[in-house]
Amino acid sequence: MSKTTEDMIQGIIGKKLGMTQIFEDNGKAEAVTAIETGPCLVTQIKTRDKEGYNTAQLGFGQAKRLKSPQLGHLKELGQFKHLREFRVSHTKGIKVGDKVKVSLFKVGDLVDITGVSKGKGFAGVVKRHHFSGGPKTHGQSDRHRHPGSIGASASPSRVLKGTRMAGHMGNRRVTVCHLEVFETDPARNLLVVKGAVPGAKNGLLLIKKSGGEE
């Protein structure tokens, strides 16, 4: 990958491998997440003159089979399972077929990681919003995990929009910002960051440098 391409594309696609802990030089145990990152291939370039915005589309992962329109779009670049766009300030110097690798990041860099959180199904207010529940005494045998009253009195005489109630929990797009890069391993396409990232094992992640193009 040319230095120009590396400077312009400030993100990469990855797969969450799992969490572990690593001991620093001072003996402190640090919780980290290991991510398989790339290598990704530039499969398409969009420009502000033609599409209205500047992006580089990256391909990641091996697909078992693709439909004819997808094969035509990739034009023998490969059979990628995931295609995602990353905004760039301009597209000069970026070419279709360029590779983006984990060497984009250095130890100490801050990154924003986006993924889909684990789905918890339909959850009550105690699990979903950390309510304390009802009283445990005075005959309240069936109110321990109930939300309690949600309505207003005379005004406005309705349930306000956004009231915290039971409902679907998790399975949403979540971004965790300013995670520090702990280690990079270009030989194994491995990125290790401090802290937790959204999603389950083998979940798809988008990793961008903090403060980069949105």
Image: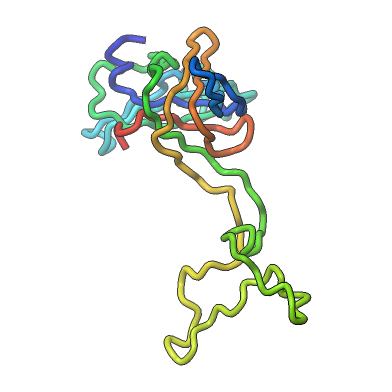
Q: Is residue 101 visible?
A: yes
Q: Quadrant of the C terminus?
A: top left
Question: Please, is residue 63 above or below residue 184 in the view?
Answer: below
Spot occupied by residue 134 in the image (x, y as percentages of width and height): 66, 73
Spot occupied by residue 14 in the image (x, y as percentages of width and height): 51, 26
Q: Is residue 33 left or right of residue 214?
A: right
Quarter of image, res 66:
top right
Q: Is residue 55 left or right of residue 23?
A: left
Spot occupied by residue 154 in the image (x, y as percentages of width and height): 46, 92
Question: Please, is residue 31 above or below residue 27 in the view?
Answer: below
Question: Please, is residue 155 above or below residue 200 in the view?
Answer: below
Spot occupied by residue 168 in the image (x, y as percentages of width and height): 61, 58
Front-most of residues 38 and 61: 38
Q: Is residue 77 visible?
A: no
Q: Is residue 177 left or right of residue 80?
A: left
Count of numbered marks = 0
Residue occupying the far top of the picture: 187
Q: Is residue 43 left or right of residue 53?
A: right
